[in-house]
Protein backbone atom coordinates (compact mmCIF):
# COMPACT_ATOMS: atom_id res chain seq x y z
CA UNK A 1 0.00 0.00 0.00
CA UNK A 2 2.78 2.41 0.82
CA UNK A 3 4.29 1.83 -2.63
CA UNK A 4 0.93 2.36 -4.28
CA UNK A 5 0.38 5.63 -2.45
CA UNK A 6 3.87 6.81 -3.36
CA UNK A 7 3.26 6.00 -7.05
CA UNK A 8 0.11 8.13 -7.11
CA UNK A 9 1.86 11.37 -6.11
CA UNK A 10 3.61 12.08 -9.44
CA UNK A 11 0.39 11.24 -11.25
CA UNK A 12 -1.57 13.69 -9.12
CA UNK A 13 1.08 16.32 -9.65
CA UNK A 14 0.89 15.83 -13.41
CA UNK A 15 -2.89 16.05 -13.29
CA UNK A 16 -2.67 19.22 -11.24
CA UNK A 17 -0.23 20.82 -13.71
CA UNK A 18 -2.38 19.81 -16.67
CA UNK A 19 -5.46 21.19 -14.94
CA UNK A 20 -3.74 24.49 -14.21
CA UNK A 21 -2.52 24.73 -17.79
CA UNK A 22 -6.01 23.99 -19.12
CA UNK A 23 -7.52 26.59 -16.85
CA UNK A 24 -4.95 29.16 -17.92
CA UNK A 25 -5.58 28.49 -21.61
CA UNK A 26 -9.33 28.59 -21.06
CA UNK A 27 -9.07 31.90 -19.24
CA UNK A 28 -6.96 33.29 -22.07
CA UNK A 29 -9.46 32.09 -24.66
CA UNK A 30 -12.31 33.66 -22.71
CA UNK A 31 -10.57 37.04 -22.42
CA UNK A 32 -12.76 39.63 -24.08
CA UNK A 33 -11.72 40.64 -27.57
CA UNK A 34 -9.83 43.94 -27.20
CA UNK A 35 -11.25 47.14 -28.66
CA UNK A 36 -9.07 50.12 -29.51
CA UNK A 37 -10.19 53.54 -30.76
CA UNK A 38 -8.14 54.91 -33.66
CA UNK A 39 -8.64 58.18 -35.51
CA UNK A 40 -11.28 56.78 -37.87
CA UNK A 41 -13.24 54.66 -35.38
CA UNK A 42 -13.13 51.68 -33.04
CA UNK A 43 -11.60 48.33 -34.00
CA UNK A 44 -11.89 44.91 -32.37
CA UNK A 45 -8.83 42.67 -32.37
CA UNK A 46 -7.92 39.05 -31.71
CA UNK A 47 -6.87 37.44 -28.44
CA UNK A 48 -3.67 35.42 -28.92
CA UNK A 49 -2.38 32.94 -26.31
CA UNK A 50 1.20 33.87 -27.22
CA UNK A 51 0.53 37.55 -26.37
CA UNK A 52 -1.30 37.28 -23.04
CA UNK A 53 -1.22 41.03 -22.40
CA UNK A 54 -1.52 42.01 -26.03
CA UNK A 55 -3.47 41.20 -29.17
CA UNK A 56 -3.47 41.29 -32.95
CA UNK A 57 -5.47 43.60 -35.20
CA UNK A 58 -5.60 42.51 -38.83
CA UNK A 59 -6.95 44.32 -41.88
CA UNK A 60 -7.07 47.84 -40.45
CA UNK A 61 -7.65 50.51 -43.15
CA UNK A 62 -5.00 53.23 -42.96
CA UNK A 63 -6.22 55.25 -45.96
CA UNK A 64 -9.23 55.63 -48.20
CA UNK A 65 -9.38 52.73 -50.62
CA UNK A 66 -7.87 53.73 -53.99
CA UNK A 67 -10.79 52.69 -56.18
CA UNK A 68 -12.88 54.50 -58.76
CA UNK A 69 -11.85 58.13 -58.98
CA UNK A 70 -9.09 57.54 -56.37
CA UNK A 71 -7.23 55.14 -58.69
CA UNK A 72 -3.87 56.79 -59.48
CA UNK A 73 -4.22 59.52 -56.91
CA UNK A 74 -2.17 60.09 -53.74
CA UNK A 75 -3.62 58.29 -50.71
CA UNK A 76 -6.39 60.08 -48.85
CA UNK A 77 -7.29 59.74 -45.14
CA UNK A 78 -9.42 56.74 -44.23
CA UNK A 79 -13.08 57.76 -43.85
CA UNK A 80 -14.54 57.41 -40.37
CA UNK A 81 -16.85 54.48 -39.64
CA UNK A 82 -19.57 54.00 -37.06
CA UNK A 83 -19.81 51.02 -34.76
CA UNK A 84 -16.92 48.60 -34.27
CA UNK A 85 -14.78 47.34 -37.13
CA UNK A 86 -13.80 43.68 -36.70
CA UNK A 87 -10.06 43.53 -37.39
CA UNK A 88 -9.71 39.75 -37.29
CA UNK A 89 -8.51 38.79 -40.79
CA UNK A 90 -5.95 40.09 -43.24
CA UNK A 91 -7.29 42.52 -45.80
CA UNK A 92 -6.89 41.51 -49.44
CA UNK A 93 -3.53 41.99 -51.10
CA UNK A 94 -3.22 44.65 -53.77
CA UNK A 95 -3.87 43.41 -57.33
CA UNK A 96 -1.06 41.23 -58.65
CA UNK A 97 -0.39 38.16 -60.77
CA UNK A 98 -0.07 34.74 -59.07
CA UNK A 99 3.43 34.35 -57.62
CA UNK A 100 5.73 31.37 -57.96
CA UNK A 101 7.05 32.16 -54.48
CA UNK A 102 3.73 31.64 -52.69
CA UNK A 103 3.57 27.82 -52.60
CA UNK A 104 6.89 27.72 -50.76
CA UNK A 105 6.45 30.82 -48.59
CA UNK A 106 2.82 30.47 -47.51
CA UNK A 107 1.68 27.10 -48.81
CA UNK A 108 -0.88 28.64 -51.17
CA UNK A 109 -0.94 29.31 -54.90
CA UNK A 110 -2.62 32.71 -55.00
CA UNK A 111 -3.39 35.64 -52.75
CA UNK A 112 -6.90 37.02 -52.33
CA UNK A 113 -6.60 40.41 -54.02
CA UNK A 114 -8.69 43.54 -54.42
CA UNK A 115 -7.98 47.08 -55.49
CA UNK A 116 -9.37 48.14 -52.09
CA UNK A 117 -6.20 46.97 -50.37
CA UNK A 118 -4.71 49.74 -48.21
CA UNK A 119 -4.71 47.83 -44.94
CA UNK A 120 -2.19 47.28 -42.18
CA UNK A 121 -1.81 44.69 -39.43
CA UNK A 122 -0.68 45.14 -35.83
CA UNK A 123 0.68 42.71 -33.24
CA UNK A 124 1.34 44.11 -29.78
CA UNK A 125 2.68 42.41 -26.66
CA UNK A 126 1.08 44.94 -24.32
CA UNK A 127 -2.18 46.78 -24.94
CA UNK A 128 -1.61 49.81 -22.77
CA UNK A 129 -1.07 53.33 -23.99
CA UNK A 130 1.52 53.83 -21.27
CA UNK A 131 3.69 50.89 -22.41
CA UNK A 132 5.80 52.90 -24.93
CA UNK A 133 7.08 49.80 -26.71
CA UNK A 134 9.45 50.09 -29.71
CA UNK A 135 7.70 49.64 -33.06
CA UNK A 136 8.70 47.77 -36.21
CA UNK A 137 6.94 48.68 -39.48
CA UNK A 138 7.53 45.98 -42.10
CA UNK A 139 7.43 46.84 -45.82
CA UNK A 140 7.19 43.66 -47.87
CA UNK A 141 9.25 42.83 -50.95
CA UNK A 142 8.16 41.40 -54.27
CA UNK A 143 9.65 43.69 -56.90
CA UNK A 144 6.91 46.27 -56.26
CA UNK A 145 4.62 44.00 -58.30
CA UNK A 146 3.66 41.31 -55.78
CA UNK A 147 3.47 40.56 -52.04
CA UNK A 148 1.44 41.76 -49.07
CA UNK A 149 1.63 42.48 -45.37
CA UNK A 150 0.72 38.84 -44.80
CA UNK A 151 4.11 37.51 -45.91
CA UNK A 152 6.50 36.79 -44.46
CA UNK A 153 4.38 36.02 -41.37
CA UNK A 154 6.73 37.52 -38.80
CA UNK A 155 4.32 39.66 -36.75
CA UNK A 156 3.41 37.28 -33.94
CA UNK A 157 6.93 35.81 -33.73
CA UNK A 158 8.63 39.18 -33.23
CA UNK A 159 5.89 40.66 -31.02
CA UNK A 160 6.54 37.83 -28.55
CA UNK A 161 10.03 39.30 -28.15
CA UNK A 162 8.68 42.60 -26.86
CA UNK A 163 8.06 44.92 -29.80
CA UNK A 164 4.96 46.17 -31.59
CA UNK A 165 4.94 44.91 -35.19
CA UNK A 166 3.07 46.56 -38.05
CA UNK A 167 2.94 45.18 -41.60
CA UNK A 168 1.39 47.04 -44.50
CA UNK A 169 0.00 46.69 -48.01
CA UNK A 170 0.77 49.32 -50.63
CA UNK A 171 -0.19 49.69 -54.28
CA UNK A 172 1.84 47.64 -56.75
CA UNK A 173 2.68 47.57 -60.42
CA UNK A 174 0.29 49.37 -62.75
CA UNK A 175 -1.71 50.66 -59.76
CA UNK A 176 1.27 51.82 -57.71
CA UNK A 177 3.73 53.28 -60.19
CA UNK A 178 1.85 54.31 -63.35
CA UNK A 179 2.71 57.78 -64.58
CA UNK A 180 1.50 59.56 -67.73
CA UNK A 181 1.27 63.13 -69.03
CA UNK A 182 -2.52 63.00 -68.55
CA UNK A 183 -2.20 62.07 -64.86
CA UNK A 184 0.42 64.75 -64.35
CA UNK A 185 -1.76 67.37 -66.07
CA UNK A 186 -4.75 66.68 -63.81
CA UNK A 187 -2.66 66.64 -60.60
CA UNK A 188 -2.77 69.85 -58.50
CA UNK A 189 1.00 69.59 -57.99
CA UNK A 190 1.66 68.41 -61.57
CA UNK A 191 3.09 65.04 -60.63
CA UNK A 192 2.10 61.44 -61.10
CA UNK A 193 3.43 58.03 -60.16
CA UNK A 194 5.13 56.84 -56.94
CA UNK A 195 1.68 56.03 -55.50
CA UNK A 196 2.98 52.90 -53.79
CA UNK A 197 5.68 54.86 -52.00
CA UNK A 198 3.19 57.55 -51.03
CA UNK A 199 1.05 54.76 -49.55
CA UNK A 200 4.02 53.77 -47.40
CA UNK A 201 4.31 57.35 -46.16
CA UNK A 202 0.58 57.36 -45.35
CA UNK A 203 0.92 54.13 -43.38
CA UNK A 204 3.87 55.54 -41.43
CA UNK A 205 1.90 58.69 -40.72
CA UNK A 206 -0.99 56.52 -39.46
CA UNK A 207 1.46 54.79 -37.13
CA UNK A 208 2.65 58.12 -35.77
CA UNK A 209 -0.92 59.17 -34.97
CA UNK A 210 -2.32 55.88 -33.67
CA UNK A 211 0.31 53.40 -32.52
CA UNK A 212 0.48 54.67 -28.91
CA UNK A 213 -3.06 53.32 -28.44
CA UNK A 214 -1.62 49.84 -29.06
CA UNK A 215 1.24 50.29 -26.59
CA UNK A 216 3.72 51.50 -29.20
CA UNK A 217 6.15 54.39 -28.96
CA UNK A 218 5.85 56.67 -32.03
CA UNK A 219 9.28 58.08 -31.20
CA UNK A 220 10.96 54.67 -31.54
CA UNK A 221 9.84 53.41 -34.94
CA UNK A 222 12.06 51.19 -37.06
CA UNK A 223 11.11 50.66 -40.68
CA UNK A 224 12.32 47.35 -42.11
CA UNK A 225 11.99 45.47 -45.37
CA UNK A 226 13.60 43.00 -47.74
CA UNK A 227 14.36 43.17 -51.48
CA UNK A 228 12.14 45.85 -53.10
CA UNK A 229 10.81 46.60 -49.62
CA UNK A 230 14.35 47.52 -48.59
CA UNK A 231 14.89 49.52 -51.78
CA UNK A 232 11.67 51.44 -51.05
CA UNK A 233 12.94 52.12 -47.53
CA UNK A 234 16.17 53.45 -49.02
CA UNK A 235 14.05 55.83 -51.09
CA UNK A 236 12.17 56.85 -47.95
CA UNK A 237 15.48 57.66 -46.24
CA UNK A 238 16.33 59.79 -49.28
CA UNK A 239 12.98 61.61 -49.22
CA UNK A 240 12.44 64.76 -47.12
CA UNK A 241 8.76 63.75 -46.89
CA UNK A 242 9.71 60.90 -44.54
CA UNK A 243 11.40 63.10 -41.93
CA UNK A 244 10.18 62.27 -38.43
CA UNK A 245 8.20 59.18 -39.45
CA UNK A 246 10.85 56.67 -38.29
CA UNK A 247 14.06 56.75 -36.30
CA UNK A 248 16.06 53.77 -37.65
CA UNK A 249 15.97 51.32 -40.53
CA UNK A 250 16.74 47.71 -41.40
CA UNK A 251 17.43 47.01 -45.07
CA UNK A 252 17.78 43.41 -46.19
CA UNK A 253 19.10 42.80 -49.71
CA UNK A 254 17.96 46.02 -51.30
CA UNK A 255 19.22 49.62 -51.55
CA UNK A 256 18.88 52.64 -53.81
CA UNK A 257 22.45 53.91 -53.50
CA UNK A 258 23.78 52.15 -56.60
CA UNK A 259 20.83 52.80 -58.92
CA UNK A 260 19.87 55.59 -61.30
CA UNK A 261 16.09 55.97 -61.41
CA UNK A 262 14.19 57.44 -64.34
CA UNK A 263 12.66 60.86 -63.94
CA UNK A 264 8.90 61.30 -64.02
CA UNK A 265 9.14 62.81 -67.49
CA UNK A 266 11.07 59.78 -68.76
CA UNK A 267 8.48 57.40 -67.31
CA UNK A 268 5.63 59.49 -68.70
CA UNK A 269 7.16 59.22 -72.16
CA UNK A 270 7.60 55.46 -71.83
CA UNK A 271 4.00 55.01 -70.67
CA UNK A 272 2.23 57.48 -72.95
CA UNK A 273 1.15 54.70 -75.35
CA UNK A 274 -0.48 52.46 -72.73
CA UNK A 275 -4.04 53.80 -73.15
CA UNK A 276 -3.89 53.85 -76.97
CA UNK A 277 -6.22 50.87 -77.52
CA UNK A 278 -8.08 50.61 -74.22
CA UNK A 279 -10.96 52.94 -75.06
CA UNK A 280 -14.20 52.12 -76.87
CA UNK A 281 -13.72 50.71 -80.39
CA UNK A 282 -10.00 50.19 -79.76
CA UNK A 283 -9.45 53.94 -79.44
CA UNK A 284 -7.32 55.80 -76.84
CA UNK A 285 -8.91 55.72 -73.40
CA UNK A 286 -9.48 58.83 -71.32
CA UNK A 287 -8.49 58.84 -67.66
CA UNK A 288 -12.13 58.37 -66.69
CA UNK A 289 -12.34 55.33 -68.95
CA UNK A 290 -9.07 53.92 -67.60
CA UNK A 291 -10.33 54.34 -64.05
CA UNK A 292 -13.49 52.44 -64.98
CA UNK A 293 -11.63 49.41 -66.34
CA UNK A 294 -11.63 46.26 -64.16
CA UNK A 295 -8.37 45.78 -62.23
CA UNK A 296 -7.73 42.40 -63.86
CA UNK A 297 -7.90 43.90 -67.35
CA UNK A 298 -5.30 46.51 -66.42
CA UNK A 299 -3.08 43.81 -64.93
CA UNK A 300 -3.37 41.64 -68.03
CA UNK A 301 -2.63 44.45 -70.47
CA UNK A 302 0.29 45.72 -68.40
CA UNK A 303 1.77 42.22 -68.24
CA UNK A 304 1.92 42.11 -72.04
CA UNK A 305 3.50 45.55 -72.43
CA UNK A 306 7.29 45.30 -72.29
CA UNK A 307 7.72 49.04 -72.87
CA UNK A 308 5.73 50.01 -69.79
CA UNK A 309 7.87 51.49 -66.99
CA UNK A 310 6.49 50.89 -63.50
CA UNK A 311 9.06 51.82 -60.86
CA UNK A 312 9.87 54.62 -58.43
CA UNK A 313 10.73 57.85 -60.20
CA UNK A 314 12.58 61.06 -59.44
CA UNK A 315 9.57 63.36 -59.40
CA UNK A 316 10.83 66.48 -57.63
CA UNK A 317 8.48 65.81 -54.75
CA UNK A 318 8.86 62.39 -53.14
CA UNK A 319 12.33 62.02 -54.65
CA UNK A 320 13.77 65.47 -55.29
CA UNK A 321 16.99 64.09 -56.80
CA UNK A 322 18.53 60.74 -57.56
CA UNK A 323 18.68 58.75 -54.28
CA UNK A 324 22.23 57.67 -55.15
CA UNK A 325 23.21 61.35 -55.30
CA UNK A 326 21.30 62.11 -52.09
CA UNK A 327 23.32 59.53 -50.21
CA UNK A 328 26.61 60.37 -51.92
CA UNK A 329 26.13 64.01 -50.89
CA UNK A 330 25.13 63.07 -47.32
CA UNK A 331 21.63 64.56 -47.64
CA UNK A 332 19.72 61.46 -46.48
CA UNK A 333 17.82 61.26 -43.19
CA UNK A 334 20.40 60.96 -40.38
CA UNK A 335 19.39 57.63 -38.83
CA UNK A 336 21.12 54.38 -37.81
CA UNK A 337 20.83 51.46 -40.22
CA UNK A 338 21.29 47.70 -40.08
CA UNK A 339 21.86 46.37 -43.58
CA UNK A 340 23.26 43.43 -45.49
CA UNK A 341 22.89 40.74 -48.10
CA UNK A 342 23.10 36.99 -48.58
CA UNK A 343 26.03 35.06 -50.02
CA UNK A 344 24.23 33.78 -53.15
CA UNK A 345 21.42 36.28 -53.68
CA UNK A 346 20.48 35.58 -57.28
CA UNK A 347 20.62 31.76 -57.24
CA UNK A 348 16.92 31.49 -56.31
CA UNK A 349 15.70 33.54 -59.29
CA UNK A 350 16.62 30.83 -61.78
CA UNK A 351 15.35 28.01 -59.58
CA UNK A 352 12.25 25.90 -60.29
CA UNK A 353 11.56 26.10 -56.54
CA UNK A 354 9.95 29.50 -57.17
CA UNK A 355 8.98 28.88 -60.76
CA UNK A 356 12.11 30.49 -62.16
CA UNK A 357 13.97 29.61 -65.32
CA UNK A 358 17.45 30.62 -66.39
CA UNK A 359 18.03 33.09 -69.20
CA UNK A 360 21.55 33.77 -67.99
CA UNK A 361 24.82 33.38 -69.88
CA UNK A 362 25.82 29.74 -70.23
CA UNK A 363 29.04 30.19 -72.20
CA UNK A 364 32.12 32.37 -71.87
CA UNK A 365 31.17 34.16 -75.08
CA UNK A 366 27.65 34.92 -73.81
CA UNK A 367 29.12 36.09 -70.49
CA UNK A 368 31.37 38.56 -72.35
CA UNK A 369 28.37 39.80 -74.34
CA UNK A 370 26.39 40.37 -71.13
CA UNK A 371 29.24 42.31 -69.50
CA UNK A 372 29.81 44.42 -72.62
CA UNK A 373 26.13 45.37 -72.76
CA UNK A 374 25.87 46.10 -69.02
CA UNK A 375 29.20 47.74 -68.17
CA UNK A 376 30.48 49.07 -71.50
CA UNK A 377 34.13 50.14 -71.26
CA UNK A 378 34.38 48.66 -67.74
CA UNK A 379 33.39 45.15 -68.91
CA UNK A 380 36.98 43.91 -69.04
CA UNK A 381 37.59 45.02 -65.45
CA UNK A 382 34.46 43.21 -64.25
CA UNK A 383 35.58 40.08 -66.12
CA UNK A 384 39.04 40.34 -64.55
CA UNK A 385 37.42 40.44 -61.09
CA UNK A 386 35.01 37.59 -61.91
CA UNK A 387 36.78 35.49 -64.58
CA UNK A 388 35.48 32.33 -66.22
CA UNK A 389 37.88 30.26 -68.30
CA UNK A 390 35.46 27.53 -69.38
CA UNK A 391 31.76 27.39 -70.21
CA UNK A 392 31.20 25.09 -67.25
CA UNK A 393 32.38 27.83 -64.88
CA UNK A 394 30.05 30.53 -66.23
CA UNK A 395 26.84 29.82 -64.23
CA UNK A 396 28.71 29.84 -60.91
CA UNK A 397 30.79 32.92 -61.77
CA UNK A 398 27.80 34.83 -63.09
CA UNK A 399 25.85 33.98 -59.91
CA UNK A 400 28.65 35.42 -57.76
CA UNK A 401 29.21 38.48 -59.96
CA UNK A 402 25.57 39.47 -60.13
CA UNK A 403 24.95 38.78 -56.43
CA UNK A 404 27.80 41.17 -55.67
CA UNK A 405 26.82 43.80 -58.23
CA UNK A 406 23.11 43.92 -57.41
CA UNK A 407 23.31 43.37 -53.65
CA UNK A 408 26.68 42.99 -51.89
CA UNK A 409 28.16 46.17 -53.33
CA UNK A 410 25.08 48.30 -52.70
CA UNK A 411 24.62 47.19 -49.09
CA UNK A 412 28.27 47.88 -48.28
CA UNK A 413 28.00 51.29 -49.98
CA UNK A 414 24.89 52.09 -47.95
CA UNK A 415 26.78 51.28 -44.74
CA UNK A 416 29.71 53.45 -45.81
CA UNK A 417 27.52 56.41 -46.71
CA UNK A 418 25.66 56.11 -43.40
CA UNK A 419 28.97 56.07 -41.53
CA UNK A 420 30.13 59.16 -43.41
CA UNK A 421 27.30 61.25 -41.93
CA UNK A 422 28.32 60.00 -38.47
CA UNK A 423 25.40 57.63 -38.00
CA UNK A 424 25.96 54.04 -36.85
CA UNK A 425 25.66 51.37 -39.54
CA UNK A 426 25.78 47.61 -38.94
CA UNK A 427 26.68 45.54 -42.00
CA UNK A 428 25.98 41.81 -42.27
CA UNK A 429 26.66 38.99 -44.71
CA UNK A 430 24.30 36.00 -44.43
CA UNK A 431 25.90 32.66 -45.39
CA UNK A 432 23.62 29.89 -44.05
CA UNK A 433 22.87 27.23 -46.68
CA UNK A 434 20.02 24.74 -46.48
CA UNK A 435 19.77 21.08 -47.38
CA UNK A 436 17.86 18.97 -49.88
CA UNK A 437 16.50 21.04 -52.80
CA UNK A 438 18.09 24.19 -51.36
CA UNK A 439 21.61 22.82 -50.99
CA UNK A 440 22.86 23.98 -54.41
CA UNK A 441 21.41 27.47 -53.95
CA UNK A 442 23.64 28.45 -51.04
CA UNK A 443 22.41 31.41 -48.97
CA UNK A 444 19.78 32.74 -51.35
CA UNK A 445 17.66 35.89 -51.65
CA UNK A 446 14.92 36.05 -48.97
CA UNK A 447 16.22 33.01 -47.08
CA UNK A 448 16.77 34.93 -43.85
CA UNK A 449 13.06 35.74 -43.67
CA UNK A 450 12.40 32.14 -42.63
CA UNK A 451 14.61 32.58 -39.59
CA UNK A 452 13.13 35.93 -38.64
CA UNK A 453 9.56 34.64 -38.85
CA UNK A 454 10.29 31.05 -37.76
CA UNK A 455 7.97 30.03 -40.60
CA UNK A 456 9.96 27.76 -42.86
CA UNK A 457 9.27 27.16 -46.52
CA UNK A 458 7.32 24.07 -47.56
CA UNK A 459 10.34 22.18 -48.92
CA UNK A 460 12.81 23.36 -46.29
CA UNK A 461 14.49 20.50 -44.39
CA UNK A 462 14.88 21.55 -40.78
CA UNK A 463 18.05 20.91 -38.78
CA UNK A 464 19.06 21.76 -35.20
CA UNK A 465 21.23 24.60 -36.55
CA UNK A 466 18.12 26.42 -37.80
CA UNK A 467 17.10 27.37 -34.27
CA UNK A 468 20.56 28.76 -33.50
CA UNK A 469 20.55 30.92 -36.62
CA UNK A 470 17.00 32.07 -35.92
CA UNK A 471 17.81 33.03 -32.33
CA UNK A 472 20.87 35.02 -33.46
CA UNK A 473 19.00 36.96 -36.15
CA UNK A 474 16.01 37.68 -33.97
CA UNK A 475 18.24 38.66 -31.06
CA UNK A 476 20.25 41.12 -33.12
CA UNK A 477 17.24 42.55 -34.97
CA UNK A 478 15.12 43.00 -31.83
CA UNK A 479 17.87 44.78 -29.92
CA UNK A 480 18.50 47.12 -32.86
CA UNK A 481 14.77 47.90 -32.99
CA UNK A 482 14.79 48.59 -29.26
CA UNK A 483 18.00 50.60 -29.01
CA UNK A 484 19.52 51.34 -32.43
CA UNK A 485 22.34 48.90 -31.59
CA UNK A 486 22.09 45.13 -32.31
CA UNK A 487 24.52 44.09 -29.59
CA UNK A 488 22.94 42.09 -26.80
CA UNK A 489 24.09 39.58 -24.19
CA UNK A 490 24.67 36.04 -25.40
CA UNK A 491 25.60 36.98 -28.97
CA UNK A 492 29.02 37.83 -30.46
CA UNK A 493 29.82 41.51 -30.55
CA UNK A 494 28.84 43.29 -33.79
CA UNK A 495 31.00 46.36 -34.42
CA UNK A 496 29.77 49.58 -35.97
CA UNK A 497 30.78 49.70 -39.62
CA UNK A 498 33.98 51.62 -40.32
CA UNK A 499 34.89 52.00 -44.03
CA UNK A 500 38.60 51.84 -43.22
CA UNK A 501 38.26 48.52 -41.40
CA UNK A 502 35.48 47.24 -43.69
CA UNK A 503 34.15 44.59 -41.30
CA UNK A 504 30.84 42.78 -41.55
CA UNK A 505 29.01 40.40 -39.23
CA UNK A 506 29.04 36.97 -40.86
CA UNK A 507 25.74 35.28 -40.03
CA UNK A 508 25.77 31.55 -40.72
CA UNK A 509 26.47 28.27 -38.97
CA UNK A 510 28.89 30.31 -36.93
CA UNK A 511 28.57 34.02 -36.16
CA UNK A 512 31.73 36.04 -36.39
CA UNK A 513 33.16 39.38 -37.49
CA UNK A 514 35.32 39.40 -40.61
CA UNK A 515 36.22 41.59 -43.59
CA UNK A 516 33.38 41.95 -46.06
CA UNK A 517 34.15 38.74 -48.02
CA UNK A 518 34.41 39.93 -51.63
CA UNK A 519 34.75 43.68 -51.16
CA UNK A 520 38.13 43.76 -52.90
CA UNK A 521 36.30 42.84 -56.13
CA UNK A 522 33.87 45.79 -56.02
CA UNK A 523 36.14 48.45 -57.58
CA UNK A 524 34.68 48.23 -61.12
CA UNK A 525 31.15 48.50 -59.70
CA UNK A 526 32.10 51.73 -57.93
CA UNK A 527 33.66 53.08 -61.12
CA UNK A 528 30.50 52.17 -63.05
CA UNK A 529 28.32 54.00 -60.51
CA UNK A 530 30.64 57.02 -60.47
CA UNK A 531 30.47 57.30 -64.24
CA UNK A 532 26.68 57.27 -64.16
CA UNK A 533 26.54 59.84 -61.34
CA UNK A 534 29.06 62.05 -63.14
CA UNK A 535 26.71 62.16 -66.11
CA UNK A 536 23.86 63.58 -64.02
CA UNK A 537 23.33 67.34 -64.32
CA UNK A 538 24.36 69.35 -61.24
CA UNK A 539 25.80 66.35 -59.42
CA UNK A 540 29.00 65.00 -60.86
CA UNK A 541 31.50 67.59 -59.68
CA UNK A 542 30.06 67.72 -56.17
CA UNK A 543 30.12 64.02 -55.35
CA UNK A 544 32.71 62.89 -52.80
CA UNK A 545 34.46 59.53 -52.87
CA UNK A 546 32.16 57.50 -50.57
CA UNK A 547 34.38 54.63 -49.49
CA UNK A 548 37.60 52.79 -50.26
CA UNK A 549 37.01 50.73 -53.42
CA UNK A 550 38.92 47.77 -52.07
CA UNK A 551 39.37 46.24 -48.69
CA UNK A 552 42.61 47.04 -46.87
CA UNK A 553 42.72 43.49 -45.47
Image (cartoon, grey):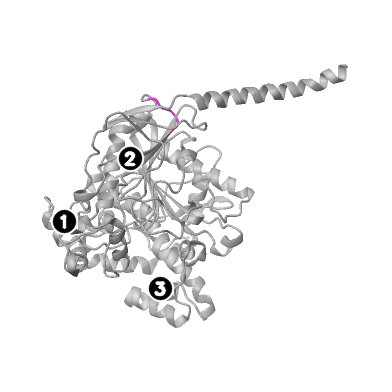
Residue 352 vs 474, above or below: the answer is below
Q: Is residue 136 left or right of residue 272?
A: right
Across and down, in percent, residue 521 comes to 44, 67
Q: CA distance from mark 1 to mark 2?
A: 40 Å
Q: Under tag 1, what secondary structure?
A: helix
Q: Is residue 471 magenta?
A: no
| Residue 529 occupies quadrant | bottom left
Of the two numbered discs 3 and 1 on the same chain, state the one appearing first in sequence.
Answer: 1
Q: Which mark is residue 247?
A: 2
Nearer the observer, 290 or 179: 290
Q: CA distance from mark 3 to mark 1?
A: 49 Å
| Region rendered in magenta | 124-128
Residue located beneath label 1 in the image: 288
Residue located beneath label 3 in the image: 382
Residue 34 vs 247, above or below: the answer is above
Residue 189 vs 306, above or below: the answer is above
Asked if the residues shown at circle 1 and circle 2 are in contact, with their CB atoms under 8 angstroms apart, the answer is: no
Amino acid sequence: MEGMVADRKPTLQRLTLCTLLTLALTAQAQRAAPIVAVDAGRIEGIVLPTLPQGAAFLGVPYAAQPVGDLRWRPPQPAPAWSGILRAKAYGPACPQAPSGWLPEMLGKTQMATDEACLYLNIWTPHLASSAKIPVLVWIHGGGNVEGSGEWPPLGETLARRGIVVVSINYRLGIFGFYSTPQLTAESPDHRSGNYGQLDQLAALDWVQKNIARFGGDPHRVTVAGQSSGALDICNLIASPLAAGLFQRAILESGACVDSIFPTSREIEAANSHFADHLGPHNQPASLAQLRALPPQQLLDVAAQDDALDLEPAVDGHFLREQPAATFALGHQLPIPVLAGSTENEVSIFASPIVGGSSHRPQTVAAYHQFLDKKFGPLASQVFAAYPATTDAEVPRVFNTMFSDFDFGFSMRLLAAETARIHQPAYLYHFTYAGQGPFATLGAFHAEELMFLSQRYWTSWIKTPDDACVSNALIGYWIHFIQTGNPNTSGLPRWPVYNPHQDLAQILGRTVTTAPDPRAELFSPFQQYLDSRLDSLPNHGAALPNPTPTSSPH
